[in-house]
Amino acid sequence: MSAKNIFREVAIENSKKQPQMVDQFLEDAPILEMIPFESTSDGLFNVYEEIENVAGPGLVDLDEALPIMDVETKLGQINLSVMGGKMYVGEDKARQFGGPAAYFAKKQPSILRKTGMDLETSILYNSLRAKAITSGASTGHLFDATGSNNTNYSIIAVKWVPGEVTGLYDPNGFGKGMLMDVQPLHGGNLAEFSQTTTDGRSVTVTGYGVRMKSYVGMQLANARYVSAIVNIDPAAATPDLPTEAQIDDLIESVRGQVGGSTWLYMHPKVKTALQKYKGDSLELRVGDDLVRTYETWNGIPLITSYNFKRGTEANVSV
């Protein structure tokens, strides 16, 4: 899949006023930056058409009636989620930093880095892995590495397909030239707000505030392109690891293709555990148009992120 429609490129292209914000946002979210994103059809929601049945042409004798062809579809809708929050600073502290704008600018990189990490975690667990678990057991898209101590990891396989399995963004948001819309609260004027002290007391402070907001979503309209191996426990007395055949089947289950549309996502610890297979299926791959070099499984890139849980996933019944 071309690099031009991955999140990083979409964000940079549509957030010309905040290029540094994009870098800060994606600094610790390596999977998020490469997920393809498309603009929604209607701002805060996306309407799509899902094929339910196709009646195709048939072979008939000469001069016999032709069969009726038809495509039965249904409409689906994905609503975007709000990504954002509010931040405050007391009047005196703002003055020490040279004003509220300087204070918020100093805090922004840490906030954005954490926001990108949280968004990536949500996509991995609340969208991709959840889809594989809820629909995969009955369709051959969920595989069991047999870990049973509630100290597990996962591998997620995704084939990104335009219009079917993709990230979504509001073009009216990015279209304003900003990845996240940052607005001062109370018109940028002094206001009172509640704050909790280090000893747990609630106090009223006079100061300034800002809110940051954007809208994103995930469209997983075709369950066949998302699969997972769960219950991976490398730390077990006898490590519970996926077999080579399971990883091959995982890729096959999403109709995996070499060339940029199919990816295997995992925690770095899982990738390290898979090194035992190096020399057979696990390969080195020369950098592609994303200007990176990945290790691959039969040509499918293995992408790691510390935004996966570190050995704390509960057992999944498969």
Image: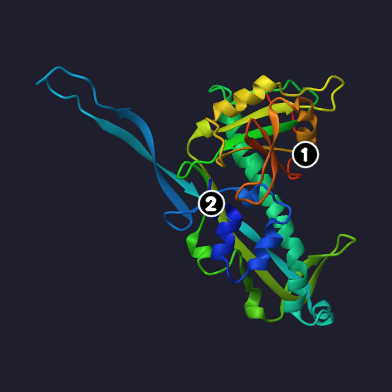
Report the front residue among 43 and 272.
272
Helix, strand or loop status at disc 1: helix
Q: Residues within 10 Å of mark 2 (few under 14, many from 20)?
A: many
The answer to which quarter of the image holds residue 283 is: top right
The answer to which quarter of the image holds residue 63 is: top left
Q: Hey, which residue is sitting farthest front in the picture?
A: 286
Report the front residue among 86 and 115.
115
Q: Tell me the number on the disc at residue 37.
A: 2
**1 or 2: tag closer to the N-terminus:** 2
Percent position of residue 268, x then y:
77, 39
Percent position of residue 139, x then y:
53, 23
Question: Which kind of residue does numbered mark 1 sit on?
Answer: Pro
Q: Label 1, label 2: how many angstroms apart (C-alpha)?
A: 25 Å
Q: Tell me the number on the disc at residue 75.
A: none
Question: Which kind of residue does numbered mark 2 sit on?
Answer: Phe
Circles 1 and 2: CB distance less than 8 Å? Answer: no
Q: Residues within 10 Å of mark 1 (few under 14, many from 20)?
A: some
Q: Is residue 196 shown left or right of residue 173?
A: right
Q: Hey, which residue is sitting farthest right in the picture?
A: 199
Helix, strand or loop status at disc 2: strand
Q: Hey, which residue is sitting farthest left in the picture?
A: 63
Residue carrying label 1: 268
Quadrant placement of the C terminus: top right
The answer to whether residue 151 is visible is no
Q: Which residue occupies 21% across, 20% down? A: 59
